[in-house]
Amino acid sequence: QVRMVESGGGLVQAGGSLRLSCAAPGSVFGRNAMGWYRQPSGKQRERVAIIRTDDTTNYADSVKGRFTISRDNAKNTVYLQMNDLKPEDTAMYYCNAVPSTLYPYWGQGTQVIVSS
């Protein structure tokens, strides 16, 4: 099965910004809400942002006001603009459909490390 391809992570100082990208299979992207998830080392994966097919969005309280999710339907790509990054944002970031059970083929993710 075709997997998501995440990119854009890296090492950044606290207060900095990163923009993540995720290329998704068209069969998944076109008909579903898409989300960004993250998994800190040793912890469970959590969803931090969702964008629906009507472009409405929701965010986890921990990132609200700092992260912005968007989608480009022509490119089957979803983005996550992350501003004012904090050390607690350090995690592996993934994208997938919402709910993720719709497409159980996770990509390799992109690592975000925020130094204090």
Image (tube, rainbow, N blue to C red):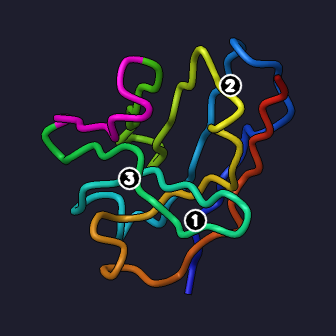
- Residue 19 percent across, percent down from the top left: 63, 28
Check disc 3 and report its element: helix, strand or loop. Answer: strand
Asked whether 94 or 86 is in front, the reply is 86
Residue 79 higher or lower than 36, as above or below: above
N-terminal label among 1 and 2:
1
Report helix, strand or loop for mark 1.
Answer: loop
Residue 17: name its quadrant.
top right
- The dot on residue 55 is none
34 vs 78, left or right, is left
**Residue drawn at 31 percent across, 46 percent down:** 50
- The residue identified by callout 2 is 18
**Can you say which quadrant of the picture contains the N terminus?**
bottom right
Give the percent coordinates (x, y) of residue 100: 36, 73
Q: Which residue is mark 1?
A: 4
Does residue 56 belong to the magenta stretch?
yes
Which of labels 1 and 2 is toward the front?
2
